[in-house]
Amino acid sequence: MEEYPVPEEWMQDISRVLFTSEQIQERVAALGQQIARDYAGKSPLLVGVLKGIIFFMADLLRAINIPVEVDFMSVSNYSPEARQQGVVRLVKDLETPIAGRHLIFVEDIIDTGLTLHYLLRSLQARQPASLEVCVLFNKDKRRLIDLPLRYKGFDIPDYYVVGYGLDYREKYRNLPFVGLLKAEALHRGG
C-alpha cells in the first residue's frame, strides 16, 4: 500500500507513533477474517458513526469476504453535561431497516462508552436478530459503562491519539498511522 506524504507541521505535533499503518492493516485484516468466519452464511449489516469511522469501515469491508451491507449514523453531542451522561442527538439515522438483521456496530475508538451505550440501546429497541460491537481502538481506562466488545483491535493508553480517522478539531484524521498528540498541540488548538 502506497504511503502518502504527511505534512511536516503535523509530524511535529506527534510525540510518537503508537500504531503504524502496517500494524493497523494487519489487525483490520484479522478482524475481517474473524467476522467472515463468525457470520458465514449470513449477510450482516455493518453500522458506523460518521466521520471518524470512514477509514476503518472501508478497510474492514474489504477484509470481509462474505456478503455484507453497510449503513451510517451521525450524531452530535449536546452540552458538556449531556455528553458526560452519554446523551446525543441523532443527526442522521440508518436508512436500512434492521429488524431481524445481524448487526455489527463498528467503532473507531471507545473511551467512556456512554455514547455507544446510548446508541446500542436505541438499535436494540429496533429488534435486530443480533447486535455485536467491533472496535479498533479501545481506551478502557476511561470506561464508565461495561460494554460487550466482541471484536477488538487494540487497547490504547489514556492519551489523546490522532490519525486513521481520529482527529483533533478536524485535523490529523488522514494520517496513515495513529500517534500521540503532544500537549502543546492540544493547547494551541491543533
Image (tube, rainbow, N blue to C red):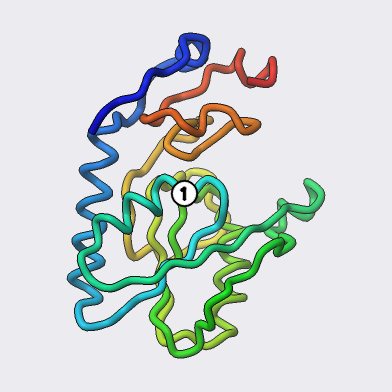
How many neighbours does mark 1 have within 10 angstroms: few (below 14), some (14-19), or many (20 or more)? some
Closer-to-camera residue (18/52): 52
Q: Which quarter of the rendering shows the C terminus?
A: top right
On screen, residue 82 above or below 36: above
- Looking at the rendered structure, the kind of residue marked 1 is Ile
Residue 188: image location, x then y, percent = 69, 15
Closer-to-camera residue (181/156): 181
Residue found at x 56% / y 76% = 123
Q: Which quarter of the rendering shows the N terminus?
A: top left
| Residue receiving disc 1 | 54
Res 34 → quadrant = bottom left
Residue found at x 19% / y 60% = 33
- Callout 1: SS: helix
Residue 44: image location, x then y, percent = 35, 76
Residue 54: image location, x then y, percent = 47, 49
**Left or right placement of residue 78 versus residue 129 in this view:** right
**Left or right placement of residue 38 versus residue 97 in this view:** left
Residue found at x 33% / y 54% = 152
On screen, residue 14 above or below 120: above
